[in-house]
């Protein structure tokens, strides 16, 4: 048996079983729970680290992300205004 | 004795052949590892004819335009549109040009923090209709043909239904999902995972999350990919084609967060598209408003958009002249590979030619 045939045979046996697992509702629930837990744990950790960093007046990643979103939102408003001006100039 | 000589000669030839293949495999493999033969996608000459925000409308001029209706290609929001123009000789755009079509391609660019607020309306009420009008103006025609791939097809449908004033003369839908609850593990994940929890710091769904969600559909797909790479190593042309496809397939782009949340709610949790009407932009976008001829091409073996996810199209397009063509292939196989070259692409080109009169006929 060639290496390719062996791998294909293994894939043929294992593949459908793995697909069965990921297609099961339980898999989606597990991934959902995992994401929620990771998100919650990450937030707790960031909060703990953040309060320490704020003690010494240092910005945290959350602060930087918040600023990034605010700058993005401002840039978006600017873009929309600029688009409206362009549309008005085009006579729409 | 002559039998023995013949046997030795065959053995010698076989060893020579195997050694030659091994040498070519080693040489091509080393060249690939060393970063030689860098794969660049998209070789067909094009120029931008319209831009808005991150979106660019590209025009691929046809040397001899014979068709009266230009084609506007709309890609999904999860990958780049490079699949339409991978390499010379492996380009759908090239085939359309050769058939005499004037080709336009809508490129979403790479969304960033500013685009995180893009909603479904941004695409169906702003970008696509404006790009379509830019096409009409640039081509100097009264009508255009829309071609959407995957979620791009869904966006085409919603645009055409929401803007009956747009002169869409025909529409080609390739692997287009309608019933989003039938998309296997992807729909299960969208139902169970809160989109807010998978947004990155820019407010978009990160490309890695998109890639992993697609990987869930075929968990052992990477093994097949590596095996195909191993098989293609001795043949330079096959290797280049394989690498071009892999370069495209791994090039996911961030999915705008606002649109992702809206799609998960409207199309997955409430499954409204399968019912035929979706509330968007303060009105009901009803797919029965589409009356133009529609070609629906879908893969029998498509794991990402299974036939069941596409099936309600016949019901929701109640007033359209629908041609349904199943092809014995998967999601990507409709644009790449043997089934694409032999069945899918010729079917599209011939159907589009029938629905786009030759210029002198007009």
Image (tube, coloured by chain):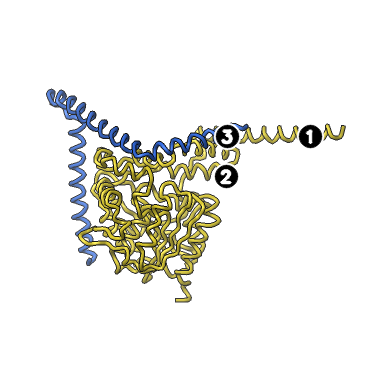
Chain colours: A blue, B yellow
Chain of the residue under label 3: A
Q: Residue at x 17, y 33 (%)?
A: A63
- Which of the 4 image quadrants contains residue A59? top left
The residue that disc 1 covers is B9
On screen, residue B186 above or below B300 = above
Question: Label 2: how many residues lie within 10 Å, few (<14), some (14-19) or many (20+)?
Answer: few
The residue that disc 3 covers is A4
Distance from the alpha carbon under mark 3 to that under mark 2: 21 Å
In the rendered image, which quarter contains the N terminus of chain B? top right
Q: Are marks 2 and 1 on the same chain?
A: yes
CB of mark 1 within 8 Å of CB of mark 3?
Answer: no
Between discs 2 and 1, the one toward the N terminus: 1
CB of mark 3 within 8 Å of CB of mark 2?
Answer: no
Q: Tell me where residue B329 appears, x and y as whole percent.
A: 50, 50
On screen, residue B77 above or below B27 = below
In the rendered image, which quarter contains the C terminus of chain B? bottom left
Q: Secondary structure at mark 2?
A: helix
The residue that disc 2 covers is B237
Question: Label 1: how many residues lie within 10 Å, few (<14), some (14-19) or many (20+)?
Answer: few
Q: Tell me where residue B344 appears, x and y as whole percent.
A: 50, 57
Between B80 and B265, the residue placed more toward the observer is B265
Question: Label 3: how many residues lie within 10 Å, few (<14), some (14-19) or many (20+)?
Answer: some
Q: Tell me where residue B162 appears, x and y as whole percent.
A: 28, 63
Q: Secondary structure at mark 3?
A: helix
């Amino acid at each position: 048996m060639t290496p390719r045939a062996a791998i294909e045979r293994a894939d043929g046996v294992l593949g459908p079983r793995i697909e069965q697992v990921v297609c099961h509702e339980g898999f989606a629930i597990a991934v959902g729970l995992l994401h929620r837990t990771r998100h919650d744990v990450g937030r707790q950790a960031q909060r703990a680290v953040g309060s320490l960093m704020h003690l010494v007046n240092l910005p945290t990643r959350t602060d930087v992300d918040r600023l990034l979103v605010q700058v993005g939102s401002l840039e978006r408003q600017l873009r929309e205004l600029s688009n409206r001006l362009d549309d008005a100039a085009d006579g729409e | 004795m002559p039998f023995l000589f013949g046997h030795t000669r065959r053995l010698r030839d076989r060893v020579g052949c195997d050694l030659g293949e091994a040498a070519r495999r080693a040489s091509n493999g080393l060249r690939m590892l060393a970063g030689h033969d860098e794969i660049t996608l998209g070789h067909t000459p094009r120029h931008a004819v319209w831009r808005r925000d991150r979106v660019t409308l590209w025009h691929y001029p046809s040397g001899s335009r014979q068709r009266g209706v230009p084609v506007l290609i709309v890609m999904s929001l999860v990958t780049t549109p490079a699949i339409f123009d991978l390499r010379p000789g492996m380009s759908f755009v090239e085939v359309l040009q050769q058939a005499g079509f004037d080709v336009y391609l809508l490129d979403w660019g790479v969304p960033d923090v500013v685009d995180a607020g893009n909603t479904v309306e941004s695409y169906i009420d702003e970008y696509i209709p404006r790009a379509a009008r830019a096409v009409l103006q640039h081509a100097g025609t009264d009508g255009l043909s829309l071609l959407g791939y995957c979620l791009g097809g869904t966006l085409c449908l919603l645009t055409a239904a929401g803007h009956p004033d747009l002169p869409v003369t025909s529409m080609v839908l390739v692997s287009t999902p309608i019933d989003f609850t039938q998309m296997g593990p992807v729909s299960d994940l969208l139902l169970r995972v809160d989109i807010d929890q998978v947004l990155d710091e820019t407010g978009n769904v990160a490309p890695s999350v998109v890639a992993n969600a697609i990987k869930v559909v075929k968990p052992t797909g990477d093994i097949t990919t590596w095996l195909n790479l191993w098989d293609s190593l001795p043949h330079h042309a096959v290797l280049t084609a394989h690498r071009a496809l892999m370069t495209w397939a791994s090039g996911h782009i961030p999915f705008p967060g606002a649109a992702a949340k809206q799609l998960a709610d409207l199309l997955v949790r409430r499954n409204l598209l399968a019912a035929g009407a979706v509330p968007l932009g303060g009105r009901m976008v009803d797919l029965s408003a589409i009356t133009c001829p529609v070609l629906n091409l879908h893969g029998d073996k498509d794991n990402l958009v299974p036939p069941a996810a596409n099936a309600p199209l016949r019901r929701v397009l109640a007033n359209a002249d629908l041609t349904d063509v199943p092809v014995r292939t998967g999601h990507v196989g409709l644009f790449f590979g043997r089934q694409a070259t032999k069945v899918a692409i010729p079917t599209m080109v011939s159907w589009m030619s029938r629905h786009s009169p030759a210029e002198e006929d007009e």
